[in-house]
Amino acid sequence: MTRTTSFRTGALLLALTLCPLLPGTAAAQVAPGPELQAGTCSVEGLMDSIRRGLKSNSESYKKYMRTLLRESAVTLPDQELRAAFERETDPLMSEHLAAALVARTERGADPEAIKAVAKRAIEERDPALRAAAVRSMRRTSALESTDGAYEKLVRDASPEVRQEAATNIVEDIQNVYAGYHGPASDAAVSAAAASTDPKVTAKILGNMDTQMISAESAGKIQSLLRDDDAEVRRAAALALGGVPAAQMASARQSVLAMFRDERDAGVRKALLQSYAQLGFIEAIPELQRLRSTDPSLAPEIDVWIRVLSLDLQEWNLILREKQRLQQVP
């Protein structure tokens, strides 16, 4: 699911308006910064202006300069832009150039440009530059269009790169796909399962919508219920609660089996929530039986039973009502 042509016309008009850079009207519309010099629309000319602009004390001006490069990307010579990105060694400038390349893909100008960014994010020796390249792909179609790059990025030697990759995945699923695109969700699950960093795996699974994942992805999440790290098990339990209807029966069995063996209280609470989400009002009989399995969680189970008994049909309403009941003295 790539956003292709919807912004192309607007981007071209903006880029043509901004290039060449004019010191008059354009500069007057932003906070004071270094004076812009008229010139031809070229990568080097833009980069020189942006380097000067990023030294400004005005955040508005710096944002304007970043936007200028990104919006001009579709009109810039592709090879010149790629070459500038490949030789750039300043992380901030590298991130801006990478964002320009990503914009070319997102707007249908070059489907391969984002892959060049992903390639450097994986192969670059400097971890700061790798992290910058990863950030440039945030809230884009990179989950789908970079040939499994995130499965490598979540195993990067740098903790910063791994965390940036996890943040990208979470924000892409939430803000680009809204959880409604199966291939992207499957790619996110694959990255979470491929990671050897518990914090990364837990961050991805604990913050994603799994309503459109495949049976294979559901199986990967179920396997993580047995992970050595409690936070991973907790995140996997929460993720299982939202699986598609076709995966619910298997998920319920896994959650119940895990609840009986689990010793961590936080994971057990997550398993209860998952089971409630998988069954709604039909989960009540089993929840009643679970009270004897762990008497310390009987109050938590009782709240779930009270909420589910209301027979609310939306999960967000159930969560809201549970929170309200727990706040009542």
Image: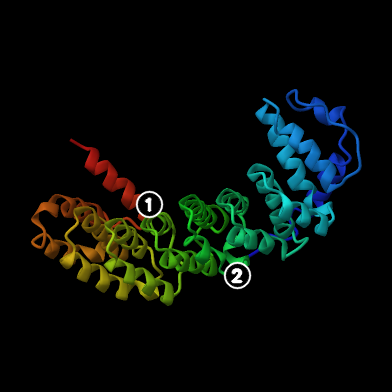
Q: Point out the image quarter for the C terminus.
A: top left
Q: Position of residue 188 (x, y in %)?
A: 48, 64
- Mark 2 and mark 1: Cα distance apart in space: 34 Å
Q: Position of residue 73 (x, y in %)?
A: 78, 51
- Vertical arrangement, residue 312 with respect to residue 254, above or below: above
- Vertical arrangement, residue 300 with respect to residue 247, above or below: above
Residue 21 is left or right of residue 50, and the answer is: right
Residue under label 1, please give it: 316
Q: Which element is circle 1 on? A: helix
Q: 164 or 61, which is in the foreground?
A: 164
Taking the view exactly as shown, the residue that stands out farthest to the top is: 32
Please identify, in this view, whether the residue under mark 2 or under mark 1 is nearer the observer.
2
Residue 40 is left or right of residue 113, and the answer is: right
Q: Residues within 10 Å of mark 2 (few under 14, many from 20)?
A: few
- Vertical arrangement, residue 172 with respect to residue 147, above or below: above
Residue under label 2, please give it: 147
In this rendering, the count of numbered labels is: 2
Displayed quadrant of residue 311: bottom left
Q: Amino acid at mark 2?
A: Asp
| Residue beneath the point at 19% across and 63% down | 262
Q: 40 or 169, which is in the foreground?
A: 40
Earlier-in-chain disc, 2 versus 1: 2
Displayed quadrant of residue 285: bottom left
